[in-house]
Amino acid sequence: MMRHRRSATTAAALALGALLVGVFGVAAPASAHVSVNPKEATQGGYGRLAFRVPTESDTAATTKVEVVLPENAPVASVSTMPVPGWTVTTEKRKLEPPLEVHGSPVTEAVSKITWTASGDAGIKGGQFQEFPVSMGPLPKVDTMVFKALQTYSDGNVVRWIEEPPAAGGQEPEHPAPVLKLLPAAAASASPAAGAAKGDSADDDEDEGNSVALGLGVAGLVAGLGGLALGGLAFARTRRPAGTPAA
């Protein structure tokens, strides 16, 4: 009876899951927006970033990707990595005032990067492509917001340009990729915190092992005691009739 009830419950759960997929499945691809990876880097350092671009359309491929660098956070050095089947171009703008990098002024910086697919290299439906970029020194700001435009082979353009919401706010429909920048001190402290957490976990594991070992020893002692009592009882039952008890 219990097995029958469990089977009925499982079947009901699967049916509900299928219903939810059917209702919300159409909206699911909207979450596959253009993003930057990793999502965190260190202020003042150099970072290797990758703009990840998925294709949500089932009938058209992504043929062009444009990424605009934030005007309020210029970067002196920006270089791109070749992507097979894609050509890349950059646009620059004048900086007023110039950036001071390693004691030298930098008067212009990359403002926009454009990748264009050639032939059939476009990103097909259900696929994604990463576009690596190296840049630095990264500015001393909390975040860099990269507004991106994604062009499809049918002419549609999706504008991933909406700013991140305030704390507790709802994510916009077409959010721009955001890179969080940590101060150098905070970034260097993170691994130490991770190590401390790992040490704590090791201590907990050692403590758990000690408790388990103690319980195992106690169980062994109890088992041996039970075995001895059982043997004594058996010996008593085997005594010849008339033999006085000890």
Image (tube, helix red, strand yellow):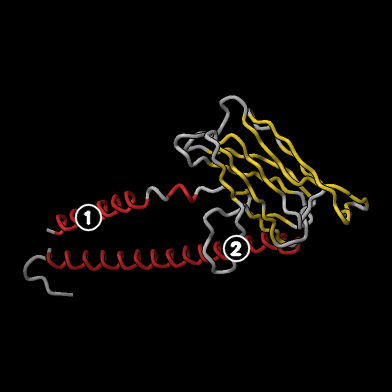
Give the x, y percent position of residue 72.
Answer: 76, 58
Q: Crowding near pointer 2: few (<14 within 10 Å), some, many (20+)?
A: few
Residue 9 vs residue 65: left or right? left
Q: Crowding near pointer 1: few (<14 within 10 Å), some, many (20+)?
A: few
Viewer-nearest residue: 74 or 228: 74
Rendered residue at 18%/55% (across/down)? 8
Rendered residue at 88%/56% (across/down)? 97
As drawn, the label of residue 199 is 2
Rendered residue at 63%/44% (across/down)? 51
Give the x, y percent position of residue 160.
Answer: 59, 50
Instruction: Kindly give the residue lying farthest to the front in the view shown.
Output: 155
Task: Locate the C terminus and report the quarter of the image it occupies.
Answer: bottom left
**Which comes before the other along the chain, label 1 or label 2?**
1
Viewer-nearest residue: 136 or 86: 86
As drawn, the label of residue 180 is none
Q: Nearer the viewer, mark 1 or mark 2?
A: 1
> Residue tagged by mark 1?
12
Instruction: Kindly give the residue lying farthest to the left in the view shown.
Output: 241
Q: Please, what is the three-letter code of the amino acid marked with disc 1?
A: Ala
Viewer-nearest residue: 73 or 185: 73
